[in-house]
């Protein structure tokens, strides 16, 4: 079907592939999201798909990086704004990220070879599931150093509690098939319960 001029320019092949991959992976899981199926959903050939993404892992990582809620940058956040508000925003985005991506990522654990390949791909990129918790820990340590959070705060435990709670909400959303109603409100309750 031809696009009308008011629809704007047609997305690039790479963008169509990522949109299709995100849909297929979230619907059917990573293990069943074949390159043939993704190419079909993107209305392109597998050869074109491989031109943009040499490995299936590259598609998965690009979907996570470009088609998922992003964490606010924490490097400059220390000392800027209320600690509670920053942690609430981070936790709300983590809830949205895990709720959106849990069904896709859960498939990794059903296929040992796929999990091993995925783990290796993340390691070569310096990425992995520990990144959100590590980032929150570093942020809290900086806030402790600035005196904005109590020195008795266990930054690592607090970060693990927040990311763990967000992951739990993602699991529940994936399991029940219902979206998280109020990620921001839930995140605020979680942060307030820590009494920082």
Image (spheres, rainbow, N blue to C red):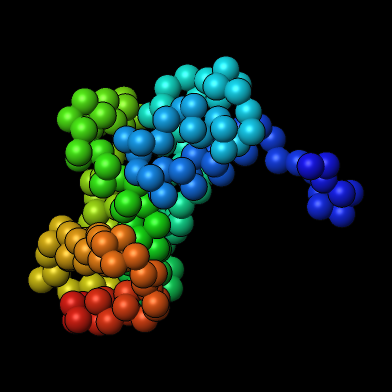
Image quadrant holding the N terminus, namely: top right
| Residue 125 percent location from the top left of the image | 35, 29
In this rendering, the answer to whether 45 lies above or below 83 is above
Instruction: Give the residue displayed 42% in from the left and 30% down from the top.
Output: 34
Comparing 113 with 78, the one in front is: 113
Number of residue marks: 0
**Left or right of residue 6, residue 143 in this image:** left
Instruction: Give the residue displayed 41% in from the left and 43% down from the top.
Output: 25
Instruction: Give the residue displayed 19% in from the left and 81% down from the top.
Output: 193
Q: Quadrant of residue 174?
A: bottom left
Instruction: Give the residue displayed 39% in from the left and 78% down from the top.
Output: 182
| Residue 175 percent location from the top left of the image | 26, 62
Image quadrant holding the C terminus, namely: bottom left
Res. 72 in view: yes
Q: Quadrant of residue 81?
A: bottom left
Comparing 35 with 143, the one in front is: 35
| Residue 26 percent location from the top left of the image | 41, 49
| Residue 47 percent location from the top left of the image | 57, 17
Comparing 118 with 33, the one in front is: 33
Res. 144 in view: no
In this rendering, the answer to whether 112 lies above or below 163 is above
Residue farthest toward the right in the current orientation of the protein: 5
Comparing 132 with 22, the one in front is: 22
Q: Quadrant of residue 179?
A: bottom left
């Amino acid at each position: 079907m031809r696009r009308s001029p008011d629809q704007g320019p047609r997305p690039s092949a790479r963008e169509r592939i990522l949109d299709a991959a995100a849909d297929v992976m979230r619907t059917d899981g990573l293990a069943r999201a074949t390159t043939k199926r993704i190419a079909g959903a993107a209305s392109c050939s597998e050869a074109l798909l491989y031109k943009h993404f040499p490995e299936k892992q590259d598609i998965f990582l690009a979907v996570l990086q470009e088609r998922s809620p992003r964490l606010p940058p924490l490097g400059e956040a220390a000392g800027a704004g209320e600690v509670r508000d920053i942690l609430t925003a981070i936790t709300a985005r983590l809830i949205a990220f895990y709720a959106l991506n849990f069904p896709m990522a859960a498939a990794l654990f059903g296929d040992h070879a796929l999990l091993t390949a995925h783990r290796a791909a993340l390691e070569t990129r310096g990425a992995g599931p520990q990144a959100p918790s590590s980032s929150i820990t570093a942020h809290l340590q900086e806030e402790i150093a600035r005196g904005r959070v109590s020195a008795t705060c266990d930054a690592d435990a607090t970060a693990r509690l927040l990311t763990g709670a967000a992951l739990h909400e993602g699991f529940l959303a994936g399991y029940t098939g219902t979206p998280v109603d109020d990620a921001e409100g839930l995140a605020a309750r979680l942060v307030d319960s820590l009494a920082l």
